[in-house]
Image (spheres, helix red, strand yellow):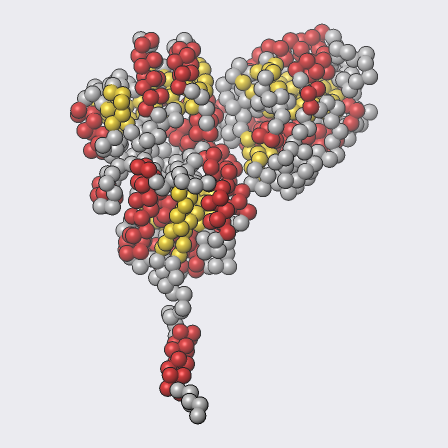
Amino acid sequence: MPRKPDKTLFNILIIVLFFLIFMPGVTSGAEDPVYVGVLLPLSGSDGQNLHDALQLAKEQINAGGGIGGRPLEFILRDTRTGDLITYAKYLVKDPRIRIVIGPHTSEELFLISDLFVKNQKVLISPTASSDEIYRAYAGTGYVWRTIANDGDITSAVMQHIKAHNGEKVAVLTINSSYGKTFYDWIPYWAIENGISITGVEEYSDLEEIPDAIDHLISQNPDYLIFVHSGSVVEIGTAFLTLNAMNASTHLYFIYPDVDEQGQIWERLDPGTLGFLLATGLWKTGSVSMISTQLPDDTLMLMSKPWATDFSQEYHTISNTSRSDFVPEVYDAVLVAAAVMARFTAYPDKSPGNAAKSILTNETGDTCDRSEAGFQSAFNKIQGGEIPVMTGVTGPLTYRKEGVDRQVPWYETYRIEEGKVIADPIPYQFREKSGSGMDLSDTPSDTTQPTDKDLPTGDYWAVIGALTRDWVNYRHQADALTMYTYLREKGVPDDHIILLVFDDIPQDRLNKKPGEVYHTPGEEEVRKQANPDYIGESVNKQMLIDILSGTGIENDEPFLRSNENSTVLIYLSSHGAPGGNLVLGDGDEQISAKEISTVLDNMAKNKRFGRMLVVLESCFSGVLASNVKTPGVLVLAASAEDETSKSTTYDSELSAWLSDEFTNELISLLRSSDRPFTLRHLYQQLYYNVRSSHPSITRGNESLDVPVHLFFGGDNNAAS
């Protein structure tokens, strides 16, 4: 006979199921871990230190109860032993992961960031410090970091030099994305602090350092700022080169303490070495092959010493007492856990929204760095509050637009009597000063020209994007957008000479073949354009011929203006120190002096009545300062010693779509609801362009002329 079912066992199962489903606080997934991905170099001596920092933070969080009762767990991918892109794709596809800590460098971040943004997963880098990251991802909510932005650090460096009466500075930087931030921002902050830049150079190889220093020191700067790769040999080469010259110039080192292997150079003075080891500036057990004593008055910017309690905690799980990036990695875990606390409480919101909610809007109590403090913070977050979490590097509070901390973590020092002395320069967020907006040395409103003084002839424009290749996408987008604006204003196509290499539309990297954009997802600017010169015909001689009228008797698209014409020349390109404009892939340049000569000859040959030259390039202020041709005004994107910065990064295309100066110029032209003068336009540009100091010619022509005369005329002016 068949056995009867065991009703007792059946009833027990029903009761257990009831409790699992309906009893409050009891769910089948209550103990499931909260997963966070990690994409960092985790092997080798320095990699092991990062791994130990991750484990310390995890153990402390879990010891207090985890996140809402759920333990924190990592899914680790060691980029030292595997392919970054492969690992990134794996972590993005894993449905358990919403946040990844990493990657290690700024270059790596740009390689994978679009993948994470597109899939709405958050990246928190503890080590990628380039300012380009901030400019690319501010406001997205998907890219954050616990390390300081090198652009902010640069401001502190220049304030430090100013405090030591430095008036002239030379700059030598490693040719990398890390070095580029300092190359870009030191001249900017020099202007803001009233310091002169006597020279700026980059180096790629160790052998280039002595010659570069020899050239830079010839201008007798007070300080030589050396931005190195971290190699102790580079540091030693710079010191020994300068020392051999017996120059009065002092060195300024940025993060001079650690090389790529985590080693430092040893001080001859045992007291100095003991001080460094005791304060945690440098690591124990790591001494380089170079043993030398830096001279007094050497200035340095380094990471702050570790707090004693954290140093003791870290030493319990690591054989190393001190190591680079350990505090930033530890704090990245705290940030990730806080964001996941918010996301698990409000899963209908995106991880990016969760990050912005709790990292940029802290209004509640401060929670200390302890097991109890972590749990208090997570509980408050899950209850809808927004507390202030504290990490090893201070309060984990971020700017409203995201990405960067409100207060970066650094310290400034000097060498005095052979010892390292703390020389603090407190961080202060500085708005751009308005000194460059003073146009008192130009003709004033009282000399404003009358209508009879203005050209009455036709309108012409020469628009040129002088570079090629995908990396220079923005230059062609800038020029095409200016062309589009003029066409919108009614300028006939045969009165606009357009030069553009035109390789971007069909570049193999273009995910939108045939198209070019200046703003993501908005107006396409290539398909309706009609370039006159493309490819190899965009060269120095062609540009000179177009402007000067050489060969104008041929039936070619040349500038056919006369003494009554209003002419706009807009050129977008890279600029080199000294004001040279780069053409093509950099093999050809046209100097500011050559452009000035062309403009002088155009004036002699009566090829314009009034002209505005707009330059979107680095160091373009050189031309604005030197052009004295009657009837010519020059509006430049940057100061003489300064770079012009890109803006509007498209993560889908992995490209910068515009430069900030041109982006702001077009915006101002399109948004103006009333007539305004070139003076007013410049003042608005100077104020609104936050990453450079736009320049304009002063003293030779009135700036009090209507802007529309130079940007399209009266719609029918060209007909």
Q: Toward which corner of the image does residue 458 lie, by quadrant?
A: top right
Q: In this view, does 443 lie above or below 397?
A: above
Quarter of the image with the N terminus in it: bottom left
Pick the residue in front: 131 or 539: 539
Residue 654 on image: x %, y %: 56, 37
Q: Is residue 91 visible?
A: yes
Quarter of image, res 537:
top right
Q: Is residue 164 visible to us here?
A: no
Q: In which quarter of the image is the C terminus?
A: top right
Residue 359 appears at what percent x and percent y? 42, 48
- Residue shown at 56%/41% (left/top)? 651
Q: Where 36 sits versus 704, above or below?
A: below
Question: In this rendering, would 38 be left or right of 679?
Answer: left
The residue drawn where x is 60% and y is 34% is 657
Q: Residue 622 appears at what percent x and percent y? A: 55, 15
Left or right, 177 with respect to 706, comes to: left
Of the pair 484 and 709, the residue shown nearer to us? 484
Please indicate whether residue 358 sits to the left or right of residue 372 in the image: right
Q: Which residue lies furthest to the left in this view?
A: 271
Q: Tell me residue 25's x, y (percent).
A: 37, 69
Query: Which residue ends up furthest to the bottom in the rendered image?
Result: 1
Q: Quadrant of residue 399?
A: top left
Q: Which residue is drawn at 40% across and 11% down?
A: 214
Residue shown at the point (38%, 83%) measured from the top left: 9
